[in-house]
Amino acid sequence: MSSVLPTLQLENITRTFQQAEEDVHVLKGVSLKIEPGEIVALVGSSGAGKTTLLQIAGLLESPTSGKISMAGQACESLDDQARTLLRQKYTGFVYQFHHLLPEFSALENVMLPQLIAGVKRALAYQKAEEILNRMGLSHRLSHRPKKLSGGEQQRVAIARALVNKPRILLADEPTGNLDDETAQKVFEEMMSLVRQTKLSALIATHNLELAKKMDKVVKLHSGYLSQI
């Protein structure tokens, strides 16, 4: 029996919201295990709760009930400071919209999470330059987001999420705001980088063709998760 712990494990996660005087049960007992190096596609219709599940998996939101563990460490009872530290250490996030800081260059946007984590400026510069080069952006290092194309902006966002070498990448429709050709190219570059660094990943997508290229596909429907 393997002694390697799952990168992420969710057990019987529920999430209930209150709208007016009615309880809305978005997640009704979701369980998911992601092994080291495993890339999992999360599919489901709009409004199915994919973003909620990703937020809970990334410790950005608390479940109504259920257990969360990262590399064997129980997370559901941690206080805000401990959750923040664990999130910084273990997770990288990519969203449909890049959320780059407009006043900073591509290079500076990728340096920032490193500086927050305590990396010396010279090393942060070097690591940011290296990962942006790997994403094909060596000619765009000094450009601010408004000077970049949509695909380039998302490449910078992916580089920013991965530069601190997290254990798991959580991505919410990372190519959903791009045209098909650009989406395919950005997805392939992201997958290549994730594979090379042997990260785990949970990637929400509407694109079933992209989903099929991952190791496993799970579908969220009516509050429940099933493998397809």
Image (cartoon, grey):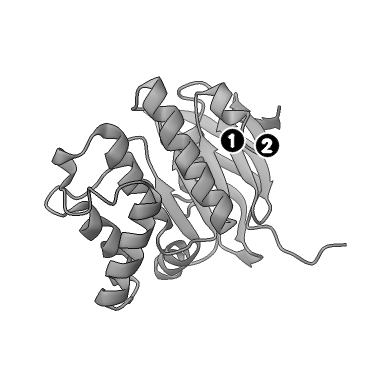
Give whichever of 146, 96 is nearer the camera.
Answer: 146
Residue topped by disc 2? 216
52 vs 133, left or right, is right
- Please, what is the three-letter code of the amino acid marked with disc 1? Ala
- Left or right relative to 143: residue 18: right
| Residue farthest right in this picture | 1
Residue at the spot 50% in from the left edge and 62% down from the top edge: 90
**Residue type at tag 2:** Lys
Please give the residue where the numbered disc 1 appears in the rendered image.
Answer: 41
Contact between labelled residues 1 and 2, with CB atoms less than 8 Å apart = yes
Q: Front-most of 106 and 68? A: 106
Give coordinates of residue 136: x percent, y percent: 35, 46
Sort mark 1 into few (<14), some (14-19) or many (20+) by Cα contacts within 10 Å: many
Element type at mark 1: strand
Task: Look at the image and tell me whether residue 44 can be seen.
Answer: no
Which element carries disc 2, helix, strand or loop? Answer: strand
Give the residue at the far left of this rendering: 103
Is 160 left, or right, of 31 in this rendering?
left
Residue 76: image tag: none
Mark 2 or mark 1: which comes first in sequence?
A: 1
Estimate how packed mark 2 is, as few (under 14), some (14 to 19) or many (20 or more) residues with alpha carbons within 10 Å: some
Q: Is residue 48 above or below residue 152?
A: above
